[in-house]
Amino acid sequence: MSILWVGAVLSTAVGLAAQRPTPTRPELLDTYHALAKRIEPTDTVRQFALARWCAQHRLARCLQWQLHVVLRSDPNHAEARALLGQVFHAGRWQPRAVAMRAQGLVEFEGRWMRRYDLARLRHARQQQARADAVRQQSERLFVRLADPDPATRHAALQDLEALAAAERSPELCDLGRRLAAAYAAHWRRRAAGSGLLTVQAQHAQLLGMRTFTTSLGNGAPVRLQLPTVRTVSIQTAIPLH
């Protein structure tokens, strides 16, 4: 009988939706009061079915009342407690936040976690933020290393060496120096009017790279994008534009 009545409640809601795609709030309240009058206060199954109907139609105050009606008859109704944001902890029902804090957990961005895990998460984010900042700064300097002006390239290399020293990344420093040498050779040959650019094996490999991965002194990985003057094969001469 209870299952049939729940079905009847849903059918009523569906019927209302069919008559009016978006029932007004007064109509929904009238429907709620009409349904509530047909239910015995101690009939927890039907009372909870009506509570779910209120939740479906976003009748917040009616939902709160229905859940308290359910709990008067069945204080341990788990689904009603869950809709009220409560959990069973230490032998009693209590707000979820209170129970979580009692277990030593802290809330962070909608999640509950141990303080140790939160500290690790924050540390990881700080490392990632630092790595992102180094990546952006390095890539700006890479672009300056490819500039035709020797003074601009020299200043960029100095800035890159300083950045690498601050971040304790000898790989980044070595990469900057190799890039600087390759770009300097490129512009020298262009200035000499040569129609060909010959790149040594190590420079050919470097200029053909799209990304370079290194790490900072704190262990944070950094993936860098390299500007490419010309992608070439080892020991290959190619015409310049």
Image (spheres, rainbow, N blue to C red):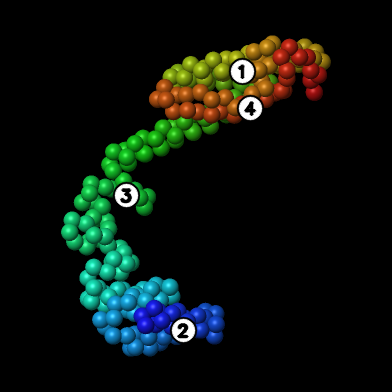
Residue 185, by quadrant, is top right
Identified by mark 2, the residue type is Thr
Q: Nearer the viewer, mark 2 or mark 3?
A: 2
For the question of whether residue 227 can be seen, the reply is: yes
* Relative to 232, residue 23 above or below: below
Label ID, residue 12: 2
What residue does disc 1 label? 179
Q: How many residues crowd around disc 2 within 10 Å: few (fewer than 14), some, or many (20 or more)?
A: some
Looking at the image, is mark 4 or mark 2 earlier in the sequence? 2
Q: Nearer the viewer, mark 3 or mark 1?
A: 3
User: Comparing marks 4 and 2, which lies closer to the viewer?
Assistant: 2
Q: Is residue 102 above or below residue 88?
A: above
Asked if marks 4 and 1 touch (Cβ < 8 Å), the reply is no
Calculate the distance from the C-alpha at mark 2 to the C-alpha at mark 3. 39 Å
In the image, taking residue 237 as reference, residue 160 lies left or right, namely left
- Which one is earlier in the sequence, the residue at label 4 or at label 1? 1
Lower position in the chain sequence, tag 3 or tag 1: 3
Q: Position of residue 183 (x, y in %)?
A: 66, 17
Q: Badge 3, how many Cα within 10 Å: few under 14, some, many 20+?
A: some
Residue flagged by tag 3: what amino acid is it?
A: Trp
